[in-house]
Image: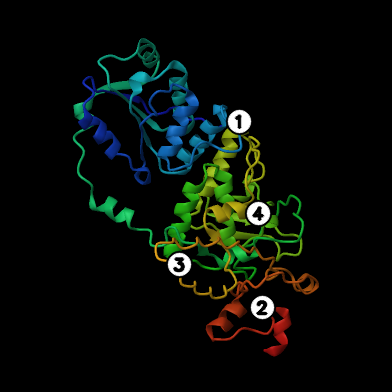
Amino acid sequence: MLDCPNPPPVTVVLDPYDDVVHTRAALASHAPQHGRLTVHPTPGTDAGIALVYDILAALGKPVPLAGHRYLDPAPVWSVAAAWILATPITHLTLLRAHLLTPHRFKDLLTLRRRTGVRLILVCHHRAMRAFLERELRQLDHRVAEASALLPEAEPATVERQVSQAARPLANRWLSLPALTTLRAFDDTAGACRCAAPMAQDRDFFPPVMAPATEAEVAWRLHRATAHPYLAAQLATAVFTAASTTQLATAHVRDLAPDGTTVTLHGRGPRRGCMTHTVPAWASPLLRAAVLHRSLGTGTGGPLFSDPLGDEGMPSLTAFAEDCKLRPPQPPQPPRPKPRGSRRGTAPAPKEPVKTIWPVCTAHYGDVLAEAEPDLMQGCPYPPPHTRKTIERRKKGWLPPDYGLRELRHLR
């Protein structure tokens, strides 16, 4: 179990007149990307699980947490601690702290001890509750006036205005070639403790995404689920082009301590065990998955599984579709032009196109690739993944040993 032996002192900010200027200043300081988190608790409730849901919502995670008992707060607090540790959150400001109850304050202190976050309590009242004063006497804390720590909020900055328009790919389906090889027909390999070489040394190069696509994928994965392991699993599939069977072989020990590399094992028909470089956008997601397991059980285990045992979670392909991520799809036939309709009638809504998840053998060994059929269902083949195929693609043609086998004799 992770524990911070010497957490920073608790800061109590007194706002005896409940000045709206101070509340706006605290809300304006909310900047998770810069390590500052401001939580405005849901009014009318004193449940501990409601408070941790407010913290997750401030982190940009969807709530309530699916897959666990609805009123069980323990898994939710563990998830919140994992995200705070994995992201650069250093300050947690809680408004309406004068309404804290003993059990909610205890949960906050546990979160502070687990993460080492600097806790700031803003009391919009002339006096703190008796239990809060009593508990604070036993902690390292300091008391400050709101006028000193919460000056008047500044108007919206250019940085915030730019961030709102920094997603040119928002609400679009993203076709990622790396997801073409997500589905597989082979069974999961057993536990492996090998020292796997880098993927480049095995002559394997996953597809590269454009910077704008990387930023959009990271944004969606951070906000699509509060479960760290689910977001980390899909992120790993995106930057490794691995199958679900390969992803299931990853253990906590396979992620480097600094989160820069992850090892996937493939002792079956795949190209063997390989170590992949973790890009910067995916590193917080994988660190959150490891920290969640460390907070839950304190031992190693499968990297992409919930240590507390979830139920009813979506499959990886279903989660990818929820994020509007999918492999490149077959070209759609042109839609027939609608006939002339009466004036004033609304056009018929378009039916959603079902996502096709092919079974591709591009990354399998030559023998098994010849024995198993390609179930591409019309989807385009993934891009070249070896030095030879990449260099030949740059010259404008594909090698005869790459692509659909039924077309190789025509090259």
Q: Is disc 1 in contact with disc 3, using a CB cutoff of under 8 Å?
A: no
21 and 122: which is toward the camera: 21
Instruction: Inspect the image, locate mark 1, and give the three-letter code of the amino acid beneath it.
Output: Arg
Q: Closer to the observer: label 1 or label 4?
A: 1
Q: Earlier in the sequence, mark 1 or mark 4?
A: 1
Q: Secondary structure at mark 1?
A: loop
Residue visible at 76% across and 51% down? 190
Q: Closer to the observer: label 1 or label 2?
A: 1
Instruction: Inspect the image, locate mark 3, and give the three-letter code of the amino acid beneath it.
Output: Ala
Q: Earlier in the sequence, mark 2 or mark 3?
A: 3
Q: Quadrant of residue 368?
A: bottom right
Q: What residue sits right under mark 3 in the picture?
A: 210
Residue 189 location (% of width, % of height): 75, 54
Q: Secondary structure at mark 2?
A: loop
Residue visible at 57% across and 75% down? 333
Q: Secondary structure at mark 3?
A: loop
Residue 14 location (% of width, % of height): 26, 21
- Residue at far right of view: 371
Q: Quadrant of residue 271?
A: bottom right
Q: What residue sits right under mark 4 in the picture?
A: 247
Instruction: Inspect the image, locate mark 2, and give the three-letter code of the amino acid beneath it.
Output: Gly
Q: Earlier in the sequence, mark 4 or mark 3?
A: 3
Residue 69 numbered mark, or none: 1
Residue 403 numbered mark, or none: 2
Alpha carbon distance from label 4 to label 2 = 24 Å
193 and 170: which is toward the camera: 170
Q: Is residue 234 above or below residue 370?
A: above
Alpha carbon distance from label 1 to label 3 = 40 Å
Q: Is disc 4 in contact with disc 3, using a CB cutoff of under 8 Å?
A: no
